[in-house]
Every structure is written in structure tokens, then in C-alpha cells.
Amino acid sequence: MIWIINFALLLFMIICALAAITVRDLLHATVILAAYSLVMSVLWAGLNAVDVAFTEATVGAGITTVLFIAAIARIRRCSED
Amino acid sequence: MRENVVIRTVCRLFVPFIQLFALYVIVHGASGPGGGFQGGVIFATSFILLLIAFGLPCVRGRFGRSWIRAYAACGIIIFAGVGLTCILFSGNFLEYAAIETALGIPHLQTLMIDIVEAGIGITVMAVMTSIILDFVGKEEEEPL
């Protein structure tokens, strides 16, 4: 049962990572990256690395998302090519 | 979004709980997962919530530039002070056992770890808040 959950989480993480680099809109990429960080933190917690999971959840999903959104507010949101 | 009473009320209700959880993570860092860095970042997150709900002037009014600078310096002073006190008692940097054996107080080591974690937490909280507030603020604001 745990094996299935782990597999689903890993699959979702890979899909998120691929989507974050292929999507055109930078805001969408940032939100997808936050979801990636959250899944990653759950996986770290599953590997008994609770400290790393904590850092991933706070810095990865929290602070960097806000920093990216603040940066996007100052530049163009979509690439033109 | 600033006028929405639901968002404002929920944010106002949640901020103290986030800060309490941050303090729990900082204090719990010696005996379990967590620690100064994570707790400080969670504490800074509460200011981000205030920023989203109430805007930059509110956060600047509650936690001004001079206060941020003072907190950041304070945490570093606590961290370095404990470390250098250990050298004073002829130990290595941050070797708490030297103080414990010199003064003969039991369980001083755990207390020292908590003080160091609190120093790290204060500095991380202040610097993270400063980075985000400076990032969000406009250029017209007074620099530094």
C-alpha cells in the first residue's frame, strides 16, 4: 500500500517538474514549482528525513514562491517566443 | 482583495498560531526535528501572510526597518556570544560542555542549545522578512 502511495507521489513530482519547465506562463510555473516542493517534502518525510522535509516545506514551498511571485510582478509574465 | 473581510479576519486569526508554531519549532529543535532556521522561516511566513492581507504599509508600521536591523544583529550577538563564552571557559567555539563543567550546573548544555537556536531563529526571521519586504516594496521607498 505504501509502495503505491510512494509511486504515485514520485510520478506526480516528475509530472510537476516537467510541467514547470514546459509551461509558458511564469506564474503558472511558480505555482507548479510550489506543488513540486510540497510533494518533495512529503517524500522526504517518508524517507525519515524530517528536518529536510521541514526545510523543503518552509523554504521551497513558502519563501521561494513568494520571492518568485514578487519578481514576476516586476517583469513580463509570458515569454514571447 | 484588501477589502475582503473574510480574508482579513482569517489572516488576523491565523497569524498568532503560525507564530506560536514557529516558537514551538525553535524550542523543540534540540530534541526533535526543527530548529532555528526552520522556526525563523515559519515566523517570517506569518509576516508574509500579514503582507498579503493588509499590505506593505501595515507590516512596515508593525515591524520597521530599524527594528528588523536590530533583531538581525541581536540574534547574531546571541549566537556569537554563547559561542565565545565557551572559549572564555577554555573550550572550543560552541562547546557547551566546557561551561557545564566549569560552573557545575547540571543540564546547562540543553539550555545553551536552546539559547543558540533562539538566536539563529531571530536572525533568520529578521533577514527573511527584510528580503521579502524589500523585494515587494517599490523603488520610490527610501533605500536601506
Image (spheres, rainbow, N blue to C red):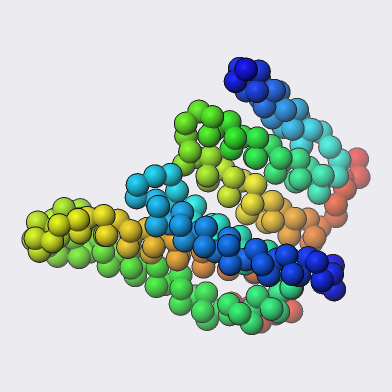
- A62 up-or-down from B51: above or below: above
Write the residue at 20% across / 59% down.
Answer: B108
The quarter holding residue B56 reads bottom right
Q: Residue at the far right: name it.
A: A80
| A52 in relation to B108, above or below | above
Image quarter where the N terminus of chain A lies is top right
Total marks drawn? Answer: 0
Which residue occupies the foreground of this view, A65 or A50?
A50
Classify residue A31 as left or right of residue B86.
right
- The image shows residue A12 at horizontal and vertical percentages of 72, 28
* Closer-to-camera residue (A53/B138): A53
Where is residue B40 shown, x and y percent of the image?
50, 59
Give residue B107's position: percent from left, percent from top: 19, 56
Q: Nearer the viewer, residue B125 or B130?
A: B125
Residue A20 occupies which quadrant of the picture?
Answer: top right
Residue B132 visible here: no
Dividing the picture into quadrants, the one containing residue B60 is bottom right
Q: Quadrant of the C terminus of chain A?
A: top right
Q: Which residue lies at the image location 62% right of the left edge and 23% below the top edge?
A: A6
Residue drawn at x 33%, y 58% is B114
In the image, taking residue A70 as reference, residue B130 lies left or right, namely: left
Q: Residue at x 58, y 50 (%)?
A: A58
**B121 horizontally vs B47: left or right:** left
Q: Position of residue B100 (x, y in %)?
A: 14, 58
Residue A74, placed above or below residue B95: below
Residue B1 visible in the picture = yes
